[in-house]
Image (cartoon, rainbow, N blue to C red):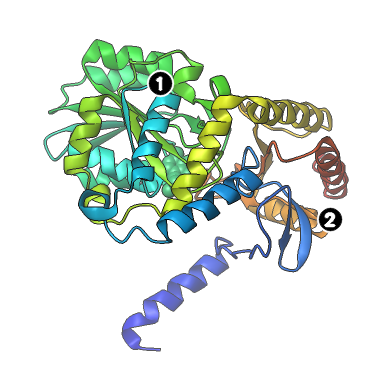
Amino acid sequence: MKEKMRFITEEMENLKASGLYNKIRIIESAQGAWIQVDGQKVLNLCSNNYLGLANHPKLVKAAKDAIDNYGVGPAAVRSIAGTQAIHVQLDEAVAEFKKVEAALTLQGGFLANQAVILPLVGRNDTIISDELNHASIIDGARLSGAKIKVYRHNDMEHLEELLKEDNQGRVLVITDGVFSMDGDIADLPKLVELTEKYGAISMVDDAHGEGVLGEGGRGIVDHFGLHGRCDIEIGTFSKAIGTVGGFIAGSQVLIDYLKQKARPFLFSSALPAADVAATLQAITMLKEDTHLVDKLWSNGRYFQEKIKALGFDIGQPQTPITPVMLKEADIARQFSDQLFKRDIFAMAIGFPTVPRGKARIRVMISAAHSQEDLDFALEQFEQVGKEMGVI
Ligand SMILES: *Cc1c(COP(=O)(O)O)cnc(C)c1O
């Protein structure tokens, strides 16, 4: 070990000593309700595969066909020679699905935030951000150099106080659509009203709302009927849509501008055609019928009702995301280990992802789960809960 690298070992030891070291489980099968993890077949309660599309035969076929037609790599950034016909089809399909003038698809939701924030605000401007916003929004905001103000989670009175202040330059207000740790939904109608009142730009990152909220999974703007009023929607394909990639949806002028200015669009290669084709297939299926989205919600309601009846505290989720509150990080970790022994894969989440004393098992319900799967999970939660004395 070189002396100059010793700080890394020390930091790793600190992480382990404070229980924050993250051991990464290896998934040895395709995604689905049941997966193989570290040699064991387990019921998967912690992926973002809300609609079970990540290994859907129709998406797999679309990806294979696209490889036959377009090959495996884009060979360029989109602004030079990486925009294949299928990329344009996807941009248009997303715009139509989201009922906006235009959309731009990118390599991921993380990058989409950088792509849109930096061209809109800089050093002389202001960003106002929810305290629980996703890391990619925080990083995008920091990179922009704008002054960053943070309002208390979903507290629209606090947001208004900050909007009333003498803010410098353009003002961009950003929120997550669905907050993925608690499963609650942003008060977007009020946020949009306030940005209209104070002349600020409104932006929602709906990564956990795409494919979940709104008619047929059209997202939070559709859920609240705010079409044309929320200036910018960010989304990802890597959650409910089951593939990978991100997008920005909004007005034609915004999207045309981003094609000139957004650095992840200009300087990082396009999505491979296979991912684009699988995503197009998913969007086609969501447009055709809503049964997967309906199943996700009925599964969510079923699980939440039953787990509450067992005596667990799940907070107040407004989506199928179900946090099972266990407060202390080591209790949550032990609970997760016990569940794993009983063939349930549900990860414990503690500080710094959630505040200290608010550790939990976050149960991610999917349309891929059958009622027997959910009953099996509930049985194991009940038994572990009783053994550990938490219910
Ligand atoms: C998951 C997530 C992202 C990242 O999306 P990727 O497509 O995985 O890069 C961005 N924003 C929010 C709010 C998310 O939950």
Residue 336 disc label = none
The quarter of the picture where the N terminus appears is bottom left
300 over 44 or under it: above or below: above
Residue type, mark 1 in image: Lys
Taking the spot 83% from the left edge, 35% from the top edge, the residue there is: 371
Residue type, mark 2 in image: Arg
The quarter of the picture where the C terminus appears is top right
Name the residue carrying label 1.
99
Q: In which quarter of the image is ligand 1?
A: top left
Which percent across, then down, holds residue 205?
A: 40, 33
Which percent across, then down, holds residue 117?
A: 25, 38
Q: Work out whether residue 115 or residue 284 is closer to the camera in this orientation and state it.
A: 284
Query: Which secondary structure lies at badge 1?
Result: loop
Name the residue carrying label 2.
342
89 over 187 or under it: above or below: below
What is the distance, in whole Å, between disc 2 and disc 1 at their CAs?
44 Å
- Residue 142 lies left or right of residue 110; in this view the side is left
Taking the spot 41% from the left edge, 32% from the top edge, the residue there is: 94
Taking the spot 41% from the left edge, 75% from the top edge, the residue there is: 8
